[in-house]
Image (cartoon, rainbow, N blue to C red):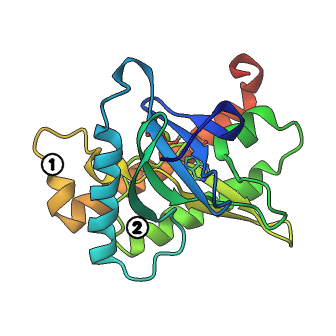
Amino acid sequence: MLVLDNRLLINEGRTRACYQHPGDKDLVVKVPVGNKKTDNRSNITELRGYQILMREQVDLFCISHCYGFVTTSLGKGLVCDCIRNDDGLISKTIWDIIVYQDDCDVDQIKKVTHDFCRFLTQRDTRLFDLNLKNIVLKLQKDGVYAPFAVDLKGRFDNKETIPVSSYSKYFARRKMVRRRRQLMERISFFREKREEWQ
Ligand SMILES: Nc1ncnc2c1ncn2[C@@H]1O[C@H](COP(=O)(O)OP(=O)(O)OP(=O)(O)O)[C@@H](O)[C@H]1O
Ligand SMILES: [Mg+2]
């Protein structure tokens, strides 16, 4: 059993906490949080989303790959790649950079995020949950950011009564274009209003 404690905590989302793997610096372990601690639904959804993605896309380098479940001191955990900067530090989400980092190149962040979304759309990679906290920016040696999707539940995040985007490439592309536009707007908006969100 893997023992997870607060020193290994990277960050928390709405349903899961993400820890460094105690035995491998290149991996993270995601466990359920809050009063739904025993509910592993998000992890199951993510692993399912990942498996479908892998069936469709062979060489997807810009995501955190998933490797299955382990038993931990905090319940069942999903093991995934840990995204790290070239200097070894764990990469931060777009949110953490634009809201908490005084000095950051917003234009570069918008450009690489825009290109990342366009790349996914052109390859019909269906990740509809691309928000500021589900993308991390890997800082490379040359100072350029490379975006990675770290939350792959979004395949099923259609918010549609009839999930047309899950079946139709055309609707999926349209949705991805809308998501990209929203992301661009949000990067500018939250950077401007960052003090209110710190
Ligand atoms: N592979 C990873 N490498 C580095 N950090 C990560 C990784 N996966 C997750 N994180 C960090 O942990 C946070 C929570 O992870 P994740 O988005 O998977 O949780 P969640 O509860 O499912 O999210 P949501 O609120 O979108 O439902 C992320 O916002 C990010 O800061
Ligand atoms: Mg998330």
Image height check: is 103 above or below 53?
above
* 38 and 72: which is toward the camera: 72
Element type at mark 2 = helix
Numbered mark located on residue 132 in the image: none
Q: Residue at x 83, y 38 (%)?
A: 101
Identified by mark 1, the residue type is: Pro
In the figure, is residue 52 to the left or right of 78? left
* Residue carrying label 1: 163
Asked if ligand 2 lies within 8 A of label 2, the reply is: no
Element type at mark 1 = loop
Question: Which quadrant would the C terminus be assigned to in this image?
Answer: top right
In the figure, is residue 130 to the left or right of 159? right
In contact (CB < 8 Å): disc 1 and disc 2: no
Residue 127, quarter of picture: bottom left
Residue 105: percent from left, percent from top: 82, 51
Q: Residue at x 42, y 64 (%)?
A: 67
* Residue carrying label 2: 121
Residue 57: percent from left, percent from top: 35, 78
In the figure, is residue 10 to the left or right of 142? left
Asked whether residue 174 appears in the rendered view, the answer is: no
Asked whether residue 63 appears in the rendered view, the answer is: yes
Identified by mark 2, the residue type is: Thr
